[in-house]
Amino acid sequence: MNILSALTAHVGADGTPVTLADRADATVVRVAGTVAKAHAPGTDPGHLARRLETAARLPGILLPPLAPAPARLHDRLVTRWPYGTPVDPDDPGAAPWEATATLLARLHGTAPPPLPPMRGPAKAARAVARLRAALRTGSHDAARPVLAAWGTLPAWARDEAPMPGPPALCHGDLHLGQLVRHPGPDGPWRLIDVDDLGLGVPAWDLARPAAWYACGLLPPGAWTRFLAAYRAARGPAVPADGDPWPALEVPARALTVQTAALAITKALAAHRPLDEAERALVDACARMTAVPYTT
């Protein structure tokens, strides 16, 4: 029995199973109102247990798990969660930017629990490593500006040094796919996916929408609402007023490089050209090397 079949059996609920994800780093299955996730091979059981404990203690911010500790299945750690209604990817105008910002501000304002570092910089470094591995068997003209931009970032953003500043509780991989309404379909929004949850620079959680805005991929109005909602909820990642960019610039640059690196890696594997949005990310990386970041 493979991990997908075993995970479906592990859910223990009646209904037709639906595979939500089946990747090397995660397999996720839904049966009725229960979701089971097999985490990446090699996931630290102690770290995952502490992340589950944190989610259980913050049910108004994070979706709480159905069990207090992970189970082991086929040498993988497995967690179970209630199903929530995700953001509709076909209705970008309804994206819950204000709710997302408010949840982040509340998360960042929580007293830091005993967790490992959030894994945002580690994921960025892994994306660049994947690109370099792909370039050993192929080539792409967009890789040069992306790798050059990576080299301009400070060591902490490349996961080569500890993160600066007083640590805050961070999600570590914030995007709209990390939100669900629970109970669905009209319950309050909650953050999901605790794999990268930890202590670090809170601006990292704002970096993806900031990067999209800087690259022209997020409308100015959506960015303005997101930032205003975060400030209204007294989020600590940016100043209460004035220019937020000095706090956001390094994380936003790192997320731009990460996303561009993954895009090129996938394009090489599929033998396809970059699409318009992917090319915008690469163009932003090219601009980074000419304009030093704010310190």
Image (cartoon, rainbow, N blue to C red):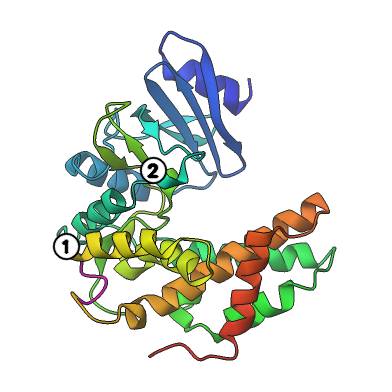
In-image side of 151 versus 236 (left or right): right
The quarter holding residue 41 reads top right
Q: Residue at x 29, y 28 (%)?
A: 66
Front residue (pair 33, 243)? 243
Q: Which residues are magenta?
A: 232-239
Determine if residue 284 is in view: yes
Name which quarter of the figure residue 278 lies in.
bottom right
Provide the major secondary structure of the magenta segment.
loop
Would residue 159 be seen by someone viewing this image from the given angle? no
Q: Nearer the viewer, residue 16 or 92?
A: 92
Q: CA distance from mark 1 to mark 2?
A: 20 Å
Under mark 2, the amino acid is: Ala
Q: Residue at x 22, y 39 (%)?
A: 56
Residue topped by disc 2? 94
- Looking at the rendering, in which quadrant would you find the C terminus? bottom left
* Amino acid beneath label 1: Ala
Q: Is residue 64 above or below residue 16?
A: below
